[in-house]
Amino acid sequence: MTAKSPRRVLLVDVNNCFVSCERVFDPKLREVPAVVLSNNDGCVVARSPEAKALGVQMGDPWFKLENQARVWGMVARSSNYELYGSLSAKVMAILGRFMAELSIYSIDEAFGVLRGTTEELTETARTIKETILKHVGLPVCVGIASTKTLAKIANHGAKKHPQLGGVCHWDAYPEEQQDRILESLEVDEVWGVAGRTKKRLAMLDIHTVRDLKYADPQLIRKKFSVVLQRTVYELRGTPAVPDDVERKTKEQLIFSRMLGAPATTTAEVEQVLSVYTQRAAYRLRKQGSVAKHLQVFASTSAFADGPRSAPYVSVSLTQPTDDPITLTKSAIAALSPHIEPGMKYNRAGIILTGITQKTSHQYLDPFVAPFEHRGLGDTIDRVNRRHGDRALGLGLAGLKDGPVWQMRRAMLSPRVTTHWDELAVVKAS
DNA sequence: TCTGGGGTCCTAGGACCC
DNA sequence: TCTGGGGTCCTAGGACCC
């Protein structure tokens, strides 16, 4: 591969990621239709090919599916993000060995860049695929093209057509054939277009991805946005989606959950907020930053009849902080007055914004009490690193067996790669 | 009676992604 | 009983400044 070879984008993504992860350590799951459920065992977030073939959709609520699943012999698992995260890290580490520029897009997907002929890169992609299967046990597909948007489409093709062996290089097809493929895709199948935009595009008589490719970029920019204009260029083979700026700190941190059982009193909502705020504060400290604003919310079910209550309050702190006590107190003080006792709150959360890097010398704030909880967060983190997650927390966050509103994870698989007491067992018999 | 133009910063909201 | 969680980017509009 010489420097003169064309620069190509590779999109590698794990097939049916969460189900495939579960199947790595539980061979029985490989023989039946399987799904993984969202937090709280709410709805389907991953499906095995067999489950897809049975017509199970993303987002199907589990309680509506449960009985039919028994008939089908379909098995469900609660989501086990620790397991998926650790397998994902292994996949990304392997990709990093093959590709200089690697940008991790999500837990199961990464873009990489390589130079080479169509044949060379197709071959490399096969090697990548085999290596990941052999060393991690996860199946992946690879899409290759001159732009990210086209690599996405190629990846989609690799998934849909088994005869490609999991690798699809867009350049392997002459342009007339490429256009026929794009013609067969509805416009919302391209990366960056969803329902709203699809409707508005239809008014301009743009229905397929091919229509969008040949639309006037200036017009698209004027009627839609620079984002959609970039998509037009990318479909034509001109890279336009910017490489992700290395941002190691998040600008916004959200911690929100559906509750396993509704909270109905102010005290219960406060307990939930206390725990959630501490989790958010932990993430904040982990990335070495502090937050200036927080938004706190709780809400009753959107599906229930009768009156709803969904308070949402914003607070600005006098100075940015990562201190769990300050954040927790502020969150509770802000939301508590808006809680209507008797309402069934089934969701709550906190959003931290105005996030900046923590500097070594913080401003002196005359309004901060002299006993300021300096270093408390760090201390909690150190204890937890040593004695296991959630060994220590403030108030209810320190309870080993959580309160009733804690989320349901009835069908959780062992965290075999991250917890000593949950290691996989190999039977000798 | 008329009340510029250009710039920055911030926030809210829309749209989308996996 | 029961319907995900966590994030990004862009745009418009208001406040403020010179």
Image (spheres, coloured by chain):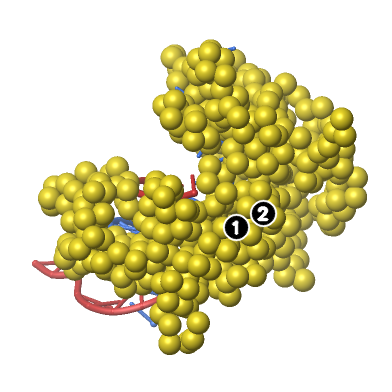
Chain colours: A yellow, B red, C blue
Residue A146, horizontal then vertical, whole percent: 38, 71
Q: How many marks?
A: 2
In the displayed structure image, the side of residue A318 where residue A384 appears, left or right: right
- Give the secondary structure at mark 1: helix
> For the residue marked with disc 2, what is the amino acid?
Lys
- The residue at the point 78 percent across, 28 percent down is A402
Residue A160, horizontal then vertical, whole percent: 39, 46
Picture quarter with the C terminus of chain A: top right
Residue that carries the numbered disc 2 in the rendered image: A134
- Give the secondary structure at mark 2: helix
In the displayed structure image, the side of residue A288 where residue A61 appears, left or right: left
What number is the disc on residue A130?
1
Q: Chain of mark 2?
A: A
Asked if residue A331 can be seen in this view, the reply is: no
Residue A70, horizontal then vertical, whole percent: 56, 15
Query: Considering only vertical position in the picture, is A251 above or below A258?
Result: below
- The residue at the point 60 percent across, 70 percent down is A98
Question: Foreground residue, A311 or B14?
Answer: B14
Q: CA distance from mark 1 to mark 2?
A: 6 Å
Circles 1 and 2, Cβ within 8 Å, touching? The answer is yes
Q: Chain of mark 1?
A: A
- The residue at the point 25 percent across, 67 percent down is A174
> For the residue marked with disc 1, what is the amino acid?
Glu
In the displayed structure image, the side of residue A211 where residue A282 appears, left or right: right
Question: Foreground residue, A414 or C9?
Answer: A414
Query: Considering only vertical position in the picture, is A129 above or below A364?
Result: above
